[in-house]
Image (cartoon, helix red, strand yellow):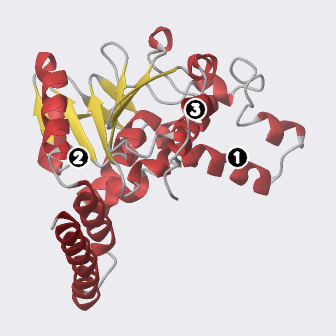
Amino acid sequence: MAQASSGASERPTEDELSRAGLELKVEGHVARITISRPERRNAMTGRTWKTLAHIGQTLPEDVRIVVLAGKGDIFSAGIDLGMFTPEGVDGERSLVAGILDGSADADDVEAYIAELQAGFLWLRRPEIVSIAAVRGHAIGAGFQLALACDLRILAGDAKFTMKEPALGLVPDLTGTKPLVDIVGVNRAVEICLTARRVEAAEARELGLAELVVPVEELDGAVDDVIAALLATNPEAAVATKALLQQAAGNTLEQQARAEREAQVGRLTSLAKAMGAGG
């Protein structure tokens, strides 16, 4: 999905962001998204994820870094459990009401979940690098949102928990693939089916965190990573991320070919730039 070149008027309004429990700040090449429902431990709803998708669709073209964080001392307690009640949350569609009253069949429910997943999928796009800055608990959907990001920078008090199986559900917000890719099937099974906490030090050992720092150093560590990422040629960054994303599914021969093709594109661009400069 290509990044949109939209004006500010097409982005989510402040009212839409507020109702979704989100804050958005775009400064130059960096967009910062904050989950902001501290009264509900930053629990998220369907509106949260649909608005995340809207943000992804309307980011300015020059945004290269997206940072996700939670307001206060917690990343997110996961899905607001009110979403599983017949009445839903604040007038939002309940995840079970349509099944209970017969107004929604399996295809309807699957289509709705696909809408929610869209709020997570865009964070993998090659033209951006997404960073989860995690303090405190990241539970269920919060854990999956962190897994949707390219990089996870954790404060020392961070804790991941995959809660869905303990609630009689499955993780369905695009988290199962990155979890298995990072820790392997056996460890992923253990983490999910015990619903235990994975604390920051273990998360780093397992590869679920690129960096763990003291709580008071989290913001500075994120800023340092942003500065290093922005120092890289933007076109080369996009091409390299795209290469890395396809590597796991390619044979060595296929990946070597992909590297050659990508490098031809880069060399051509650099040569044209030299010619224009001469």
Which class describes the residues within 10 Å of circle 2: few (<14), some (14-19), or many (20+)?
many
Give above or below for 202 relative to 245: above
Could you say which quadrant of the image residue 217 lies in?
A: top left
Q: Residue at x 33, y 59 (%)?
A: 180
Q: Position of residue 267 (x, y in %)?
A: 20, 76
Q: Earlier in the sequence, mark 1 or mark 2?
A: 1
Q: Position of residue 76 (x, y in %)?
A: 41, 25
Residue highlighted by disc 3: 11
Residue highlighted by disc 2: 208
Q: Is residue 162 visible?
A: no
208 relative to 43 in the view: left or right: left
Element class at badge 3: loop
- At label 2, which amino acid type do we have? Leu
**Cα distance in 3D space between marks 1 and 3:** 22 Å
219 relative to 23 in the view: left or right: left
Element class at badge 2: loop
Q: Earlier in the sequence, mark 1 or mark 3?
A: 3
